[in-house]
Image (cartoon, grey):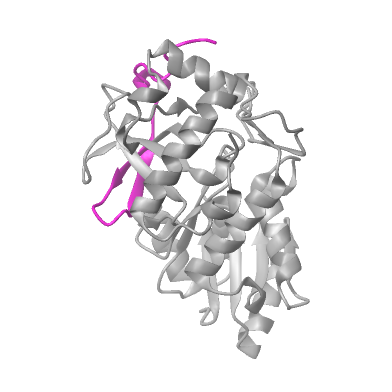
């Protein structure tokens, strides 16, 4: 049993998505030891899986303690999360890095067009300061694909970044400023010049660097200081090979090979209808060589058109039955 990975990025309809997701489940049940053990523990067999709602979602915490791999291919890249002080980190063992690269390139083009037409300015200090970041891998690829020499990474050199932004604005260059939240706030406090040709995209995360702010407050501050109508957002994580994007108002859209669902916070094996808030479950078919069905620790709400918003995160005390077993 093998997976035609080209089919993942050729999905056009929800029916095609479901058909391929069911095939991926069968493959991962057969060839992913951790996922099979989890399904077996729940007394779920492949014969019972007829629709997306039948598929069990692996708690994301397993990426901290287990090697989640489908098949026998060798690992080529290990992506890791930043973690918290004294805490364990998630590790995503990637056996085919081209799947990740196809995923983020195709998704960006779907939502924003040809990445080469943008000047890419990456303000990602907390990610640059460690190794194993999947976000840095994506940003580095975008920078290399950009046709502009000014594209590059910025650490703490905010004055240089401001100068570059103003020069690009003067030339009318279409620019993407991709930044972690606390660094964008640091930049905005000392900016005060309206940006007409720049898309600001935050990747989330204060990382303990600043006082936590709700999304609306943070976006409002950035919009006022940077003179832009909307703040865009990228939703991704170490355990995924796909990203969702928001072009404003905190509403995210998935590429055709990714789907977000919500689960009941009191019954983690029960999925909810659109419009109700709950724990975020993600189907990421680009994760065909690890696990495509993940129960995250984020809280959110999914709408009838497939868009979703992130409302926060579970406290550890609120994760009821998410980690149902220790394999």
Would you say 319 lies left or right of 303 here? right
Q: Can residue 315 be found in the magenta stretch?
A: yes
At 53% from the left and 53% from the top, the residue drawn is 7
Q: Quadrant of residue 324?
A: top left
Would you say 200 lies left or right of 45 here? right
- Quarter of the image that includes the C terminus: top right
The answer to whether residue 61 is visible is: no
**Residue 201 rendering spot, x and y as whole percentages:** 52, 62
Would you say 245 lies left or right of 43 here? right
The answer to whether residue 63 is visible is: yes
At 54% from the left and 49% from the top, the residue drawn is 242
Q: Quadrant of residue 254?
A: bottom left
At 66% from the left and 69% from the top, the residue drawn is 120
Q: Which residue lies furthest to the front in this view?
A: 1
Q: Which of 64 and 12 is in front in this view?
A: 12
Tell me which segment is drawn in magenta. 299-327
Question: How many badges with numbers are in the image?
Answer: 0
Q: Nearer the viewer, residue 4 or 100?
A: 4
- Quarter of the image that includes the N terminus: top right
**Residue 238 rendering spot, x and y as whole percentages:** 60, 39
Whether 320 is drawn above or below 198: the answer is above
Q: Can residue 309 be found in the magenta stretch?
A: yes
**Residue 141 rendering spot, x and y as whole percentages:** 72, 60
At 76% from the left and 40% from the top, the residue drawn is 131
**Residue 73 rendering spot, x and y as whole percentages:** 73, 33
Whether 61 is drawn above or below 236: the answer is above
Q: Which of 50 and 112 is in front in this view?
A: 50
Q: Which of 20 and 311 is in front in this view?
A: 20
């Amino acid at each position: 049993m093998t997976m035609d990975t080209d089919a993942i990025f050729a999905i056009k309809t929800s029916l095609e998505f479901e058909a391929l997701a069911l095939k991926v489940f069968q493959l991962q049940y057969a060839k992913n030891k951790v996922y099979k053990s989890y399904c077996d523990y729940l007394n779920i067999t492949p014969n019972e899986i007829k629709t997306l709602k039948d598929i069990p979602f692996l708690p994301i915490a397993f990426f901290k303690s287990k090697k989640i791999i489908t098949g026998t291919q060798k690992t080529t890249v290990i992506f890791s999360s930043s973690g918290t002080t004294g805490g364990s980190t998630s590790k995503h063992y990637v056996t085919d890095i081209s799947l990740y690269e196809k995923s983020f390139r195709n998704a960006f083009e779907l939502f924003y067009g040809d990445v080469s037409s943008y000047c890419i300015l990456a303000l990602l200090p907390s990610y640059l300061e460690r190794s194993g970041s999947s976000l840095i891998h994506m940003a580095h690829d975008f920078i290399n694909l950009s046709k502009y020499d000014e594209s590059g990474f910025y650490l703490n050199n905010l004055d240089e970044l401001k100068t570059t932004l103003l020069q690009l604005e003067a030339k009318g260059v279409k620019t993407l400023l991709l930044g972690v939240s606390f660094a964008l706030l640091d930049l905005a406090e000392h900016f005060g010049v309206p940006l007409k040709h720049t898309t600001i995209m935050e990747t989330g995360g204060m990382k303990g660097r600043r006082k936590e702010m709700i999304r609306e407050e943070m976006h409002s501050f950035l919009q006022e200081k940077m003179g832009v109508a909307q703040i865009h957002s990228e939703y991704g994580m170490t355990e995924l090979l796909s990203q969702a994007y928001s072009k404003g108002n905190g509403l995210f859209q998935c590429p055709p090979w990714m789907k977000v669902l919500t689960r009941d916070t009191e019954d983690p094996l029960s999925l909810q209808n659109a419009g109700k808030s709950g724990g975020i479950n993600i189907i990421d078919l680009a994760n065909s060589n690890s696990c495509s069905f993940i129960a995250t620790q984020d809280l959110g709400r999914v709408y009838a058109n497939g868009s979703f918003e992130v409302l926060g995160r579970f406290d550890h005390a609120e994760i009821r039955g998410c980690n149902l077993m220790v394999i």
